Image (spheres, helix red, strand yellow):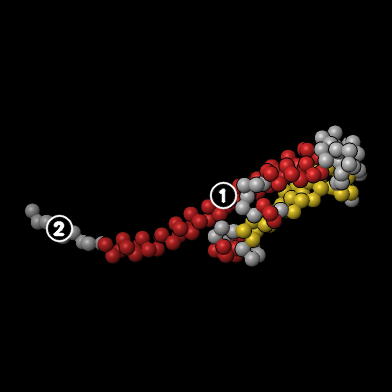
Amino acid sequence: MKRLKTVKRTGAVLIEFALIVPLLIFLLLGIIEFGIVVMHQLTLEQAAREGSRLAAVRNPTPEVVERITNSIATLPNGSELEISMAYSTDNGLTYPYTLEDTGGGVNDAPTGSLIQVSLSLPHHLVTGSFFGWLTGARNNTLPLHAEVVMRRE
């Protein structure tokens, strides 16, 4: 029997590896970035929900703001949080009134009105401008927003 020669393919394997690795790294970085954005968005939504619930059960606005800021304490850029609290007496058509403190340990929203808590937070992309073009982010920042409305009890 005659033996067949084995052909060395180390060059082809190296080229295939060099073509596939950047694609896999791109995919891995995308998964990481997406996961962090979703985590920050969910944290922001939960903070808005907690703040809206506190305001709906007659808590004063400083307590509401404190609870919201404590809820997002795990986020790296929590100091850039913008909080907006308003209430509506026309069943949510407009929110012309800013939620204020009455001084008696309660906020000034009348019973039955709708209280809206809006939070905005810029998310600084972990990968920088690598995915900025894909997400439409400006200055490597993606704006996150959460809004919750609850009826005043």
How packed mark 1 is, by other alpha carbons closer than 10 Å (few <14, some 14-19, many 20 or more), is few
In the image, is 67 to the left or to the right of 94? left
Contact? badges 1 and 2 (CB < 8 Å): no
Residue at screen point 79% across, 44% down: 62
In the image, is 4 to the left or to the right of 9? left
What residue is pinned by disc 2? 4
- Badge 2 element: loop
What residue is pinned by disc 1? 35
- Classify the position of the C terminus by image quarter: top right
Rendering quarter of residue 128 = bottom right
| Residue 150 visible to the viewer | no
Residue 27 image point, x, y percent: 49, 56
Residue at screen point 16% across, 60% down: 5
Q: Is residue 129 above or below residue 92?
A: below
| Residue 57 visible to the viewer | yes
Q: Which mark is residue 73?
A: none
